[in-house]
Amino acid sequence: MSRALAKCFRSPSVLLVTSIILLSFTIHWILIKPLRCSHFQIKYAKPLATLVDNEEKVTEIFNAITRTVPSVYFTNISTTTSAKNSRGIILDLKKQYCVGDSLTVQVTMFDYVGKRKTYGGDFLRARIFSPKVEAGASGRIDDLNNGLYNVHFALFWEGNVKISILLMHPSEGVAALWRARNSGYKNIIFYGQYEYRSKKVQSECGFELDSDEAKCEYGAKEDKDFFYCIKPDNVSCESLISVTSKERSHTYLNTLEKTLFLRSNIGVEIPQTTESVDVMSCNRNSEVKPKCSTGMFQPFPSGYFLNNVWYPVFCNLSTYDPQSHISNCLSGKKIYIMGDSTLLQWTHYIASIMNSLKFFDLHASGSFNTLLLLDTDKNVYIHWKKHGHPLLIAYAFTVKDYSTVNQEIDRLEGGPQTVFVFSLGHHFRPFPITLFINRLLNTRKAIERLFLRSPDTKVIIRTENTREQSVAMDRFSDFYGYIQYQLTKDIFQGLNVGIIDAWDMSIASGAFELHPSASTVKNQINMFLKYIC
């Protein structure tokens, strides 16, 4: 790898930029930098645990993101970015490339009438891939804010390497989505089921209720994180037993804006003057990397697939299969897993490869219930639990064991044999971003408190991943997920935690699925095992 590329991809001062784009915001107290491979440092002047209130910080972060979103309005399709009219060209094209070289594609954006775009903000997704060797890696996108984008790739393997750059949303669509997301809480409606003596009552619930009726308030005042239900007559608030949710027939987009999010306008390939390059090994010496451990800085891209195996670029994933040692790795450990159905996948996958683990029947009712796996011979304890509201589930799920991730962390004693894994993401997409920011800040505080009383506890964060493009974009667009991914990596920066970069894996593999494939889950578990063993 060239020295310039190595500096750009490995420097701890480089901005985390996804294969995707556009928004260059680096939050945390607060440093705004353009989306470039520039040197900056996010400084943690004092632990968040010393802060009494998140409100000011949430507003500060929200405003920082908003300043990076293009301030444009969609008025006519002819003036929006057209993927088919845009072009990508490799800068300084070589006759031969070697493994470790860098490659930059410059994309010039044009609108539907062939006029050059003069501002940035388009939401892009870029990767290189080689189907024959099941290889793929994300690209780092540099928005020059003038209709030009430089897409940087590191060539990690030899062979014919194909290039793909997709226009997910034009800048006009990005602006519309950002306004829509932060307009309110009407996309989703929740219903609470109350049981009091022989009485069963259903009531409307949510984070914000447009009603003058008496309300039940659920949540911790110190977290400023509340969920409400309209209080049923003659029923106590403590009688809430379950919650369900569904989408409303509502949108914050206007009629014209909705046309931008027809499926045919999402994820359109941008033509390249050169669609692939040939890469030779050139007998380059492999780099000696440190063992994977928590607290390591992760560049973007953080790794690549080769022969369908994920290789992190910042640490050494041994050539042997970590899962062949899973019994010894997990022996004596207490593992707490908290998140959505993507971490539920983890739980079932671990059970499938470690036959000595058995599910313990907790006799729970409803859906999305807590799971417990035990191996009494090896003294292994694995506990999966759903994260707190919001949970977008059509079936009733119990709230009697309700807690947020930060509340659950505060209940942990911790210790060298304790592992806490969590993920927050998909279920937050239909709601204003301030809800997600506040939850992350509260979670960081809880981790800091945990490390003060038990610094040898392992904490692992699985980022969210991309999802299907057939869903309602005004609620579930990957643009929303991208912002949440960036926030997650930025807010937990500087802590001794391990990051499983599910987003990067999704882009590198070209996946458009909420629930990753079994092979992707396997690679995530490989990283998890390397962090904790």
Image (cartoon, rainbow, N blue to C red):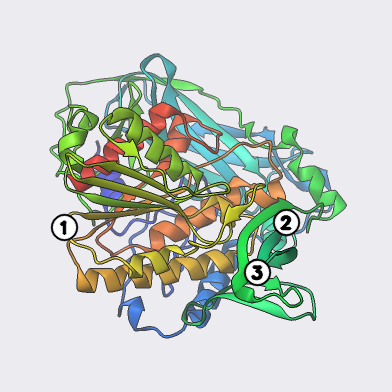
Q: Which residue is mark 3?
A: 207
Q: CA distance from mark 2 to mark 1?
A: 47 Å
Q: Amino acid at mark 1?
A: Pro
Question: Residue placed at 18% from the left, 38% from the top?
Answer: 316
Image position of 220 with respect to 343: above or below = below
Closest to the observer, 435 or 345: 345
Image position of 486 with respect to 27: above or below = above
Question: Residue placed at 59% from the left, 53% from the top?
Answer: 397
The numbered mark, 3 or 2, whose residue comes first in the sequence reads 2
Q: Amino acid at mark 2?
A: Ala
Residue 531 left/right relative to 226: left
Q: Quadrant of residue 301?
A: top left
Residue 333 left/right relative to 519: left
Q: Residues within 10 Å of mark 2 (few under 14, many from 20)?
A: many
Q: Which residue is mark 1?
A: 416
Q: Quadrant of residue 230?
A: bottom right
Q: Residues within 10 Å of mark 1 (few under 14, many from 20)?
A: few
In the rendered image, is residue 110 in sight? yes
Closest to the observer, 125 or 496: 496
Question: Residue placed at 21% from the left, 60% from the top?
Answer: 457
For the N terminus, the image quarter is: top left
**Which SS class for mark 1?**
loop
In the rendered image, is residue 146 in sight? no
The numbered mark, 2 or 1, whose residue comes first in the sequence reads 2
Image position of 378 with respect to 240: above or below = above
Q: Which residue is mark 2?
A: 176
